[in-house]
Image (spheres, coloured by chain):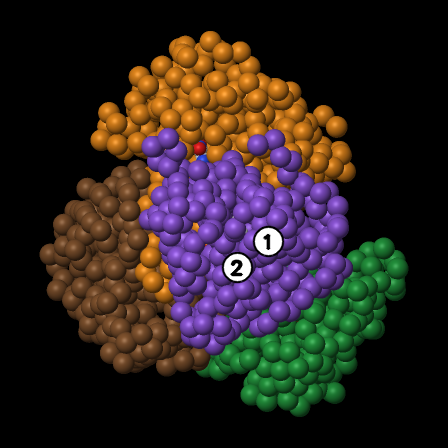
Chain colours: A green, B purple, C orange, D brown
Amino acid sequence: MGKRVINQVCRITRTVQINDAYFELWFSSPEMSELLEPGQFFEIMTPGSERLRIPISAYDKHADEIGMMIKIVGDGTRQLSTLKPGDALDVVGPLGNSFTRPTDKRVLLVSGGIGYPPMFMLKKSLDESNRIWWVHGGRCKQDAFDTDCVFTDDGSCGSKGFATIGVEKALSEGGFDWLFACGPEPLLKRCAELAKAYRVQCELSLEAYMACGIGVCYGCAVAIKENDEIVYKTVCKDGPVFNGENVVWK
Amino acid sequence: MGKRVINQVCRITRTVQINDAYFELWFSSPEMSELLEPGQFFEIMTPGSERLRIPISAYDKHADEIGMMIKIVGDGTRQLSTLKPGDALDVVGPLGNSFTRPTDKRVLLVSGGIGYPPMFMLKKSLDESNRIWWVHGGRCKQDAFDTDCVFTDDGSCGSKGFATIGVEKALSEGGFDWLFACGPEPLLKRCAELAKAYRVQCELSLEAYMACGIGVCYGCAVAIKENDEIVYKTVCKDGPVFNGENVVWK
Amino acid sequence: MEMTARLGKLTLKNPVTVASGTFGINYADFFDLSRLGALVTKTITMDPRQGNKPPRLFETECGLLNSIGLQNPGLEGFLRDDLPRYREFDTPILVSFSGNSIGQFRKMLERMESFEGIAGYEVNVSCPNVEKEGLAFGTDPKVVYELTRELAKITERELIVKLSPNVTDIVAIARAAEEGGATTIALINTLIGMAIDWQTGKSRIARGGAGYSGRAIKPVALFQVFRVAQNVRIPILAMGGISTWQDALEFFYAGASAVAIGTRNFVQPDATIQIIDGLRDFLINNDQTLSDIIGKVNGIES
Amino acid sequence: MEMTARLGKLTLKNPVTVASGTFGINYADFFDLSRLGALVTKTITMDPRQGNKPPRLFETECGLLNSIGLQNPGLEGFLRDDLPRYREFDTPILVSFSGNSIGQFRKMLERMESFEGIAGYEVNVSCPNVEKEGLAFGTDPKVVYELTRELAKITERELIVKLSPNVTDIVAIARAAEEGGATTIALINTLIGMAIDWQTGKSRIARGGAGYSGRAIKPVALFQVFRVAQNVRIPILAMGGISTWQDALEFFYAGASAVAIGTRNFVQPDATIQIIDGLRDFLINNDQTLSDIIGKVNGIES
Ligand SMILES: Cc1cc2nc3c(=O)[nH]c(=O)nc-3n(C[C@H](O)[C@H](O)[C@H](O)COP(=O)(O)OP(=O)(O)OC[C@H]3O[C@@H](n4cnc5c(N)ncnc54)[C@H](O)[C@@H]3O)c2cc1C
Ligand SMILES: Cc1cc2nc3c(=O)[nH]c(=O)nc-3n(C[C@H](O)[C@H](O)[C@H](O)COP(=O)(O)OP(=O)(O)OC[C@H]3O[C@@H](n4cnc5c(N)ncnc54)[C@H](O)[C@@H]3O)c2cc1C
Ligand SMILES: Cc1cc2nc3c(=O)[nH]c(=O)nc-3n(C[C@H](O)[C@H](O)[C@H](O)COP(=O)(O)O)c2cc1C
Ligand SMILES: Cc1cc2nc3c(=O)[nH]c(=O)nc-3n(C[C@H](O)[C@H](O)[C@H](O)COP(=O)(O)O)c2cc1C
Ligand code: FES
Ligand code: FES
């Protein structure tokens, strides 16, 4: 790929507690900020940690500052949530490929839960010539973020039900050229199916358990169709963004 | 032995930073305080720890409050040094046997470094009819505590040299009936030799790496002469106090 | 909540016991030992044993090294001093024992047969076999088969064979024990590890190599339990790094019928009770019984 | 500071390399790979391999489970695409490879012999042997001896045999490799472990069992290195949970001539460099050389 990956101990510049489960973490790195593209991610850890790094997507950037949005789901993310401005964060990145950025198209963004941050960054980087509609789904109010159309499983915010309802509605109204999605696998799978049915180009950002993050260990394999063959690609290096048509679902 | 051992989560009532390396930790436990005798120890940990408990001698007590004096030597003791009043401490104890308490005798107390706390408690509990002389040795000023006669390896406090000089001096002046000691092995060994040479009764408090702390795992074995046989005794249950004559030195 | 566990010929009131050598009567200070599903004793040998030179213990980053060397009062000392105290508790007593030849194993078992209050035996085959150049009994399926068969002939009690994990083919050994007449397989005994003080080059344990237990070995134990469960029909008593009731559930899913807690007792003296309570609450909350879980691991595709 | 290390036929500029499968050219983004004592490639096989079904990774409390299944581009793909890139660095390239029969191992080695820029081979014998009912090559001393002898006949290059720790008698296997003509023994490959999601009963790894590496296995690796060092004359390349230069020192004391860093690379991409620098500083501060340390473990009494 030829893209450079950097390992730096960076300073936390800002933290935002969004709600009980989600927080933002901002760090400063002119070098990474310059390289960063939407869809890419970082492998981060607090210095001295003995555990694997935690893969986290880029969410936003302001000049030298890079923002991430993180959901507390276990020990590692809980530990990250205790960081304060001035603390050190050991970052490897930017990692992985990025989304296609169309111009002058109708674009459907779809995010589920913590799939929100990469979509946010993609949206910001899309040319103004595009017309964008963003459907977001979450389990409850906590997982609901400001988008054009919000669904929650329990109806505590936006419409009740799965985001796929909103996706299908949007696509069935027609006119979309592109669908970009990030979120849980069932959502992505449905997006791929709908995109195919409605003949919309589709790029999905996948997740996988990761170790190296740079394409050497083959730990983060995902089955991808390539010239009618099924091969295992690395989510960390060949992805995380894949053409929706090529993903082989479990 | 029939003595009861308690496992309690206690409150830290007080902490004292003695110097960079030593601190005091006080916790409250009416039950343990009642049972406690000088020479005994506790196995302590911060609740939730995954590591073996840390054996720490009783240092002092005031009514329900029990004090320990701890030297920071590694991760576990460093972690303990961060505890604050009100924090929880998971304590197993009191453990092990205790010193003989003579009456109306001349008693020599000897401590080396972190061997100080059990001697402190022993001294407090000795009958006023006894006449006591206490020799303490340490590596440097930090390890020197208030006693009748202090030695440091580097001469930074008290006399320069090993505590054994003070022990020999005291014994050679004669009149001692008892020697109690706690500290590093070479010191204890020399005390045992000197006690024998000067025909003084001798009890030593030994250390060993421990797991269970209650005499079931046989991990803390020390070789002890018993009826002309050499057997392995447990420091945690048969000890930590042994008759100096019976200890088999490496 | 019904939590009984079948272990060979026994029905335990719950599926949690203790790992040999990590527990003793002294734990009665902390809780009522009758609450345990069973009580496994420290391994005893025919003659008293002094054990190994100290230092015998060292805690590594995630586990424990021990080199006790089976220090124990010998069979007669055990029968005279310890067994009566074990019998005071309302839970089956399983006596762990080891010999240096098949004949010695048999003699020990014969002697114990005449004592009441022993529900069964745990045969520790990790010890050197004097008849086979000191190779551990547990490394040779033929020897394990013969030993088990000899012992099965002379007892009607529960006969657990406890395996060492340090073998090329654990399944072959487990099958040999099953064929020989074992009624339960226990695994795993400790791995073998070492630690050296990098500042001085001194071995942390006087003997060099030492038994390695605790959290670090859990994945290894889980895999061996899984493998054996796939290949034998008798129940499995699982151990190896189990510290929480969640750990215990992993072992049940892998195929264990009961679990034993070892190294964790040193950290948390009532670990067994916390695990029993945690399991019971889990089963109640999920409206499940153990049999819904035992051996029901899923998601494996090759 | 003089830190050269002798490894069989090679003299390395320092005693630190990488463990096969945990490293690749991409690490050149983080530091100059020429600083490494040597570069060991991921294991390659004759034909390209897809690898195992995901999920392939799971981090346990103190280690890592992996089930990659030797995904690799095959020998020709490696020689065409990867080897030229490896050769750009000023450090010996050691190609790790594996076959499914002695014949296939030999063919692969013969093909590689005709390529420049390969300093030696690391023979991965942890793979199933199709000629012996799929039992791993590395579990049978006879097979290891034959395989090594066949390969030693046809190369003058450094010939490392990398052993699996999952055997009853590691010394027998190491001796077989030595007798067959190996110039270095590498150990250990991964233990085998498993993890299950206690909430769902799902195996964390699609294949069930998986390679277990990282800090948790360090004591096991150290003991096996010690045992083998006591029993063979050829040098040992040690690996298994090494994360710091202090860890590396333990392995040198146990008898290793060089060390390889594996799982730790994932946490700290420049772990190897930190270890090299730490070792150098230690040796300077103590006015020692590696040979003052290698094999000099003390304090062992039995
Ligand atoms: C490319 C990519 C981008 C991501 N972006 C974000 C993001 O922007 N914000 C966010 O909150 N989360 C993101 N995640 C998910 C995040 O990495 C996990 O939530 C985190 O690793 C959980 O760690 P933990 O220690 O808190 O929880 P744990 O208790 O360790 O694990 C919880 C779950 O997280 C997953 N996980 C754990 N370790 C890893 C690992 N090493 N690699 C991958 N998954 C793992 C597992 O599925 C596990 O079941 C992303 C993941 C990937 C792969
Ligand atoms: C009966 C007894 C009474 C003690 N009383 C005191 C006291 O009053 N004050 C005090 O400061 N220290 C006391 N110690 C020593 C104290 O237990 C150790 O310093 C402590 O365990 C070190 O733990 P760490 O994690 O800080 O250091 P680590 O880095 O883990 O170890 C440093 C050294 O401490 C020793 N040690 C580590 N773990 C154990 C263990 N489980 N059992 C025994 N020794 C261990 C080892 O020799 C090791 O080399 C006592 C020890 C014993 C056995
Ligand atoms: C200090 C200690 C002593 C042990 N003694 C014995 C023993 O006498 N007999 C035996 O079969 N296993 C013995 N074991 C092994 C344990 O019973 C158990 O199989 C092993 O430690 C794995 O379980 P754990 O990780 O939960 O401790 C001992 C383990 C330890 C730590
Ligand atoms: C993800 C991963 C992939 C591995 N791939 C290989 C391999 O291809 N060939 C091999 O010989 N060993 C392989 N190993 C084993 C390592 O080389 C090493 O022997 C083992 O992980 C122990 O070292 P460590 O604990 O430092 O990782 C792999 C290990 C891991 C974690
Ligand atoms: S995480 Fe190692 S290849 Fe993707
Ligand atoms: S520490 Fe277990 S017997 Fe003393």
Residue plotted at (18% across, 58% down): D234
| Mark 1 residue type | Lys
Residue plotted at (55% across, 64% down): B147
- Dot 2: chain letter: B
- Residue C54 rendering spot, x and y as whole percentages: 38, 45
Asked whether residue A46 is in view, the answer is yes
- Residue B138 rendering spot, x and y as whole percentages: 47, 66
| Mark 2 residue type | Trp
Disc 1 target residue: B123
- Residue B215 rendering spot, x and y as whole percentages: 52, 37
**Nearest the eye: A7 or A113:** A7
Q: Is mark 2 within 8 Å of ligand 2?
A: no
**Nearest the eye: D44 or C17:** C17
SS of the residue under disc 2: strand
Q: Residues within 10 Å of mark 1 (few under 14, many from 20)?
A: many
Q: Is residue C9 above or below residue A33?
A: above
- Residue D255 rendering spot, x and y as whole percentages: 26, 58
SS of the residue under disc 1: helix
Q: Is residue A1 above or below residue B108?
A: below
Left/right placement of residue C103 relative to residue C268 reads: left
Per the model, the C-alpha gap separating discs 2 and 1 is 9 Å
Left/right placement of residue A110 relative to residue D165 reads: right
The disc placed on residue B169 is: none
Residue plotted at (50% across, 66% down): B149
Is disc 2 in contact with disc 1, using a CB cutoff of under 8 Å? yes
Disc 2 target residue: B134
**Nearest the eye: C268 or D196:** C268
Sequence-wise, the earlier of marks 2 and 1 is 1
